[in-house]
Image (spheres, rainbow, N blue to C red):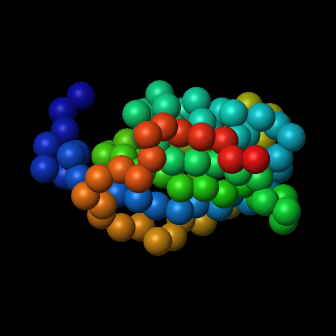
């Protein structure tokens, strides 16, 4: 897999919120596993509104891959209506050491 190193090494942070049938279908567990697989850090949690929200941090190419996963795949039994991404910014260093499920 070839990658433009300058862009590939840029670290970004982005907040996300996922709408649809995303609670009670192991969405957080799958999100955590996918994030770790991609080498990302951040967090994921259920909201009182029935959505799932969190933050992703890592190399831009991996974050883009995770955004696509959140928008189109999710956990096997989930049904994603839409994904909102906001507060995207370039960061100098990661704020987290791993990818956590927040209760």
Residue occupying the point 77% across, 53% down: 46
- The percent coordinates of residue 21 (x first, y second) are 82, 50
Residue occupying the point 51% across, 70% down: 86
Most extreme residue toward the bottom is 87
- The percent coordinates of residue 11 (x first, y second) are 29, 53
In the image, 16: left or right of 76?
Answer: left
Q: Nearer the viewer, residue 26 or 95?
A: 95
Q: Is residue 93 above or below residue 98?
A: below
Q: Is residue 80 above or below residue 100?
A: below
Q: Nearer the viewer, residue 10 or 74?
A: 10
Residue occupying the point 47% across, 28% down: 37
Residue 101 lies in quadrant: top right
Q: Quadrant of the N terminus?
A: top left
Q: Nearer the viewer, residue 3 or 11?
A: 11
Residue occupying the point 60% across, 36% down: 32
Residue 4 lies in quadrant: top left
């Amino acid at each position: 897999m070839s990658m433009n190193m300058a862009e590939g090494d840029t670290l970004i942070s982005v907040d996300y919120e996922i709408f649809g049938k995303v609670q009670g279908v192991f969405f957080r567990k799958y999100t955590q596993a996918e994030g770790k697989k991609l080498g990302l850090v951040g967090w994921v949690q259920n909201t009182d509104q029935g959505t799932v929200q969190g933050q992703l941090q890592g190399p831009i190419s991996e974050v883009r891959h995770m955004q696509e996963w959140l928008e189109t795949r999710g956990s096997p039994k989930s049904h994603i209506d839409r994904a909102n991404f906001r507060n995207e910014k370039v960061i100098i260093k990661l704020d987290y050491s791993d990818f956590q499920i927040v209760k």
